[in-house]
Image: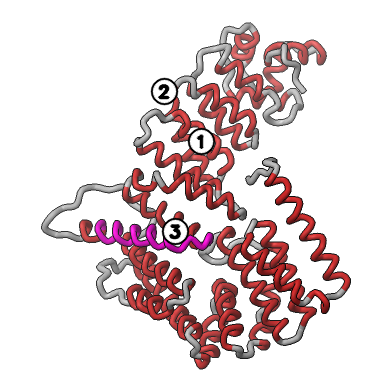
Amino acid sequence: MIPTDTTISTELLRYLKKENLSISSFANKSRINSGTLSRFIKGQQPLSVSNLDLITEAMNLEEGYFYSLYANECIIQSSPNWRRLGPFIMRCAELDKLKCLDHVIGMMMDNLTYSSLLFDSAEALYHKGNLEAALIIYTKVAESEKHQHAERLALCQYRIFTCSLNSNQENNLNCTIQFETYVKRLPEGVQLDALKDLANTLVSLRQWNKAKYHTQEMGRISRVLYAQKHNQTRPSRKHTQPAKPLFGYILYSDLLLGSIAADNDDYDQALYYLSCYEDQSWIIESDETAERTKKQFQEWAIGNRYLYELMKGNIEVLEPYIEYLSSRENEVLRALFKVIQAANMYHFEIEKILERFESLITDHLQRGGSIGSYSEHIIDDRFANFLTDLGMYYIRKENIQKGSKYILGSLDLSYKINNVTNIVRCCSTIEHIRHKLSHSDLQNYAAIMKEVYYRNEKKVNGTITHS
């Protein structure tokens, strides 16, 4: 721990005295110009972060050891200079010195002229995948933004939304509530991606009406932009370009609307939307990327047609559907989510199918993670419900041991992601078969419920946090 009454230069001087080193010899050791080093010690020249790292390395200290001191000396004790602060911020992020980063950004926001530069740094970190560091900067910039309708504020809120999503449903619901009001303030190109991310999150939260509204907005805006792009008589004004081809958002809006209809058991409407993204005759683009995108939606249409027919009770499509899935590993688990529902609804046998994919189910139960284009927070919710459906299937078949295994697995996952609805569903099922459970299953059930009770107690007392 560095004493609070010290500076980097005094620490360096102590080290030189202790090791009996001259400035010149330490300059050779640290690979820093001796004149630069001498002027820094005398307080005549500030230190760059790259030279600070070289000094730290030469003193055999851990990377970033002097960063808290450097932050104070850079901002409080000398005139802030972006040429030093910019690289310093990136290094704090790189070394995961998040407390130091938060401290530096907080001090810098006293001068609002840094907002634009800090936002650019956050964008660079975001695109590098350093979301925690980016989130700190986006939050500080958003808090300081005086112009409440500014485009930069909306972009900050979009990034805060995507960086803050996790496996906790209550957290994700709060994130959507905070972000929804900013969507329309985004540039139209960025707005399409924001609507897609927002709709996907709302689908995972079973907020069907809101999900449908934002999906329809994505479809409406993308259709307008697509028509403007290909209007030969009236040249369209320039827009911020979205991440994917415009026609892809049109197709995806229909795909998602079909999925929402299916989740609400309206399979006729789901098949209508399927016909919309299946018909691609209106698409003008024909380059390699466009053809790849179109082919992907055509394949989804084939699989979803099997699925929707199965959910309507047409059991004859089950075998060809499974064959379709056999060569598409990323889609198997998502498809099983619905197959098990159909099996429970129409009471048909799927033991051979479950045996065929049991290792895939077990592997995901142990490891978790994303599946295909579905992110982790969406899949966790659906997987928890799937495990309950799977357990109920085996219980109906009088295989209590296997059924209880999946119900307890679902209960444990539902507790972790705060899926209250499925917790109630699992508990109801377990209580119904309690007299048939083994001693170890009862112990496992009691342990999980103890954790659920503890969380609820903390929440009632106002001490629980979600991160």
* Residue that appears at 68% across and 13% down: 9
Q: Which residue is mark 1?
A: 139
Q: Are marks 3 and 1 in contact (CB under 8 Å)?
A: no
> What residue occupies the far bottom of the structure in this picture?
316
| Pick the front one: 98 or 144 | 144
- The residue segment tinted magenta is 204-225
Q: Which residue is mark 2?
A: 113
Q: Are marks 2 and 3 in contact (CB under 8 Å)?
A: no
Where is residue 2 shown, x and y percent of the image? 75, 20
> Which label's residue is closer to the chain start, 2 or 3?
2
Estimate how packed mark 2 is, as few (under 14), some (14 to 19) or many (20 or more) residues with alpha carbons within 10 Å.
few
Where is residue 188 shown, x and y percent of the image? 31, 49
Q: Height in image: 195 above or below 97? A: below
Q: Which mark is residue 410?
A: none
Q: Amino acid at mark 2?
A: Thr
Estimate how packed mark 3 is, as few (under 14), some (14 to 19) or many (20 or more) residues with alpha carbons within 10 Å.
many
